[in-house]
Every structure is written in C-alpha cells, then in structure tokens.
C-alpha cells in the first residue's frame, strides 16, 4: 500500500518546528523562527528526490522552504 502523505494546501497556515530545522538554517532565520514560527504555504519545490519541499512565507514577508516533516499545523 502507498504510504504517501498528502501535502498541505497552498494558503495553509503552518508553524515551523524549530527543533527539526535548527541544524541546517542560518542563525538569523533561526532567531526569526524562535520569535514567530507562523507562516503560510505559498507553493511547492522539488527537492533532492527525497521529498517535495514547501515554500513558505513568514509574517515578515520573508520566504524559505522546508520539508513537510519540519512543519506543524498552524
């Protein structure tokens, strides 16, 4: 049976799980996420073949991408 998870829809409100991303992000972005982890999904990104990335926009307007397992429902 296929074990694929459905991706969150574009426009969904989410939160970044900082514990799952702090080892790969620049300190300035970690600081921003620590202050406010809320974001909105803006699109999808093909990644390294492991998964599809989620392009998110933070309240500040800055955009970045994350793997689905690095986010939580907002």
Image (spheres, rainbow, N blue to C red):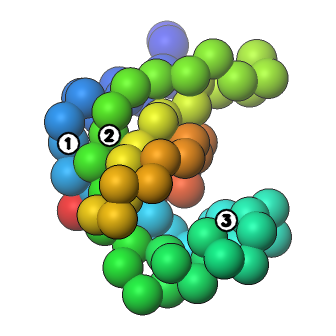
Taking 15 as reference, is 13 left or right? left
Taking 67 as reference, is 35 left or right? left
> Distance between the Cα atoms at labels 2 and 1?
5 Å
The residue lying furthest to the top in this view is: 1
> On residue 41, which mark appears?
2
For marks 2 and 3, the one nearer the N-term is: 3
Residue on which the image places disc 3:
21
For marks 2 and 1, the one nearer the N-term is: 1
Q: Which residue occupies 56% across, 22% down?
A: 45
Crowd around label 3: few <14 · some 14–19 · many ≥20 (10 Å): some
Dot 1: element? loop
Dot 2: element? strand
Taking 32 as reference, is 38 left or right? left
Q: Is residue 15 visible?
A: no
> On residue 12, which mark appears?
1
Dot 3: element? loop
Q: Which residue occupies 42% across, 87% down?
A: 35
Q: Is residue 26 visible?
A: yes
């Amino acid at each position: 049976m296929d074990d694929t998870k459905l991706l969150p829809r574009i426009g969904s409100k989410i939160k970044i799980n900082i514990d799952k991303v702090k080892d790969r992000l620049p300190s300035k972005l970690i600081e921003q996420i620590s202050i406010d982890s809320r974001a909105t999904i803006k699109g999808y990104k093909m990644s390294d073949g492991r998964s599809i990335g989620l392009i998110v926009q933070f309240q500040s307007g800055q955009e970045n991408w994350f793997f689905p397992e690095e986010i939580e429902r907002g």
